[in-house]
Amino acid sequence: MTGTEWIEAALGRYEYPLLRCAVRITGDAETARDIVQDTFLKLCVADRSKVEGHLAAWLFTVCRNRALDLVRKEGRMGRLDESQAVVDRSITGRPGEAAAQREAYELLLEALASLPSQQQEAFRLKFQDDLSYREISQVMGKSLGTVSKLLSTALCSVRDRLRARVELARED
């Protein structure tokens, strides 16, 4: 695969997940696009042999660091309004199914919002961006054990919160 084909393949595979990551950090879709563009420009000049074995981790690390640097520089790290996020919400089926899916989605977002920021980040890197524990470890600069603990705790918290909501709904 030529260098251009390799970059195009990386762009096709990672552009959207990197946009989601950058929007989560900055809260702004336009800024996120600039950050992702910078990330791919850095990939274009990077030594392919040093990146190829861990491309996802490299891209997410560069993107995350650039976004965090920008947020620190501008001093505006706020909670993400999910309506601003670039999210694929393809819901199909009958209107009742769509409403139930939407309600479940909203409950999940609410449960995620209640997590500490590092648990949120690990959860989203794993389940939205489909990164491995090792890749998450590299992106977040945490040990594999810490990533495992963050995800385990996050999953338990989300599960418990969703169960409590379901039980409250049954009582009504």
Image (cartoon, helix red, strand yellow):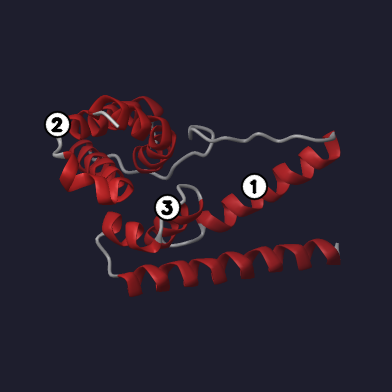
Local secondary structure at mark 3: helix
Residue 35 disc label: none
Residue farthest front in this picture = 1
Q: Is residue 36 left or right of residue 126?
A: left
Which numbered mark, 1 or 2, is in the foreground of this view? 2
Name the residue: 23% across, 29% down. Answer: 3
Point out the image quarter for the N terminus.
top left
Q: Nearer the viewer, residue 49 or 159?
A: 49
Q: CA distance from mark 1 to mark 3?
A: 19 Å
What's the residue type where badge 1 is placed?
Glu
* 27 over 172 or under it: above or below: above
Name the residue: 85% across, 35% down. Answer: 94
Q: Earlier in the sequence, mark 3 or mark 2?
A: 2
For the residues labelled 3 and 2, say whether their Cβ atoms are less than 8 Å apart.
no
Point out the image quarter for the C terminus.
bottom right
Q: Nearer the viewer, residue 28 or 5?
A: 5
Q: Which residue is mark 3?
A: 125
Q: Earlier in the sequence, mark 1 or mark 3?
A: 1
Q: Which residue is mark 2?
A: 45
**Figure disc tally:** 3
Local secondary structure at mark 1: helix
Residue 106 disc label: 1
| Residue 82: percent from left, percent from top | 52, 39
| Residue 105: percent from left, percent from top | 65, 47
Q: Where, by quadrant of the figure, is residue 23 drawn? A: top left
